[in-house]
Amino acid sequence: MEVYLSFLGCKVNDYEVEALKASFLKLGHKVVEYVKEAKLIIVNTCDVTEVAKNKSLKTLRSLHKLNPEAKCVAMGCIVEDLKEEIFTKLPFLSAAIGTRGRKEVLKIAQNTPLEPRLVLNDKTSRTYEELGHIASFKGHVRAYVKSSDGCDKFCTYCIIPYVRGRMRIRKREDIILEIGELLNHGIKEIVLTGIDTVAYLDELGDLVSLLKDILVTYPNLYRLRLSSVELSTLSDEFIALLKNDRRLCRYLHLSLQSGCDRILKLMRRHYDKEAFLKRVKKVKEEVSDVSFATDIIVGFPSESDEEFIETLNFIKEVNFFKVHVFPYSERNGTYAQKFLKDDVSKEKKKERVHALLDVEKSLRENILSKMLGKEVEILIESKDNKNDIYYGMSDNYIMLGVKDAHIGDIVKTKITQKDIDFNVKVRF
């Protein structure tokens, strides 16, 4: 059967689609690039915000409209959120599969009836669902590898633990074997990802021990990148590993969410500003060229203008390289939706988003300007055929363009003003 696969949202969703693609190909099915060629359409959805949820629904409707004869399956987080209601919103669906039992979709491709049409996750399960190893990733030189699923933190604004379920750890041997298969097929950078990547803990140790195992097992691995970190990740042991093994990327996506202690407490984040800043400074003192990115929610219930300014000032103090900004939106079933009033207007949230992005742009431009003329090493990932320029990323997430290269090359180049202008204008 011809299968069209699509996803919205996070790196985990991207990985899951690649794993399903590998399973379909092993069974002899054909994965197609164009939806009109498909007999089966599968969309791995995102539900992290109301905007993401609506975008997922819109995508499914659009794909069905383009090819109404194909079977259509919704998969992932919005299925867990909407449950049976998804068939009211999308009556054309052949099935809806949540964040577990994804291999059930293979039965549809084999024309085996799927019962029931709605497959939901057992949110209490602690068993990781292995989708099978992948050996390639969209023809790229960078690949995501999933290390865990679910989350136990239950931040008050977040729906993810309710739709993904409790923390489930992937077997270390499966992670390491999959990385080996990817390296054998030309992948040069591995991005370790999960819903709560940093909470990895098995009988052999924690995340740092997993990172060490990967780096020792594969001395030929060019780069190992973490999709995200938490404050608890930044232990002295982790900082020492980051300092001493250049293969571990010096770009850390460290979620902050707010720069106001009162709001952090309402969010049920397990740190305050002082602790956050102390560990960031420790990393910067020990590791050269490290850069930090973060996530911020603006307009959280009861956030005042003064508290937003406090967040702005803290962003400047930490000196983040990138800031991903999200206006707060109620998520059904969360503590914040049940017990906190969404009392910041949409207009106010929009103003705060733009104000924060203006600060981020200024910070990034300043950081890059200090690197002008510096030589960095990049991994070539893509080509702009129109301008005949090859683009690659440094380990601390600076995109640079060069001539006369090939995808997969490792190139040393100097940062120019043109590169700075490009990185300030474009968000990755």
Image: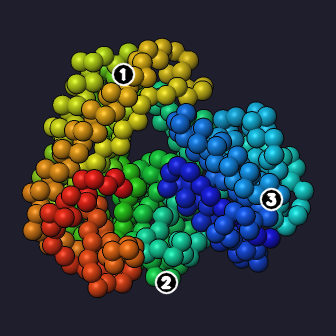
Q: Earlier in the sequence, mark 2 or mark 1?
A: 2
What percent of the width, then of the height, locates residue 166?
Answer: 58, 41
* Residue 162, image quadrant: top right
Determine which of the numbered discs, if any, sits on residue 348 in the image.
1
Local SS, label 2: helix
What percent of the width, then of the height, locates residue 278?
Answer: 18, 40
Q: Earlier in the sequence, mark 3 or mark 1?
A: 3
**Could you tell me which quadrant the C terminus lies in?**
bottom left
Report crowding for label 3: few under 14, some 14 to 19, many 20 or more residues within 10 A (C-alpha): many
Report crowding for label 1: few under 14, some 14 to 19, many 20 or more residues within 10 A (C-alpha): few
What amino acid does circle 3 point to?
Ala
Residue under the point 51% across and 76% down: 139
What amino acid does circle 2 point to?
Asn
Query: Does residue 344 appear to the left or right of 184 in the view shown?
Result: left
Query: Does residue 377 appear to the left or right of 133 in the view shown?
Result: left
Residue under the point 43% across and 75% down: 141
Of badges 2 and 1, the one in the foreground is 1
Is 370 placed above or below 230 here?
Answer: below
Q: Which residue is mark 2?
A: 184
Q: Which residue is mark 3?
A: 70
Local SS, label 3: loop
What percent of the width, then of the height, locates residue 132?
Answer: 64, 68
Is 30 placed above or below 152 here?
Answer: below
Q: Which residue is nearer to you in this view: 206 or 326? A: 326
In space, the residues marked 3 and 1 are separated at their CA atoms by: 43 Å
Q: Earlier in the sequence, mark 3 or mark 2?
A: 3
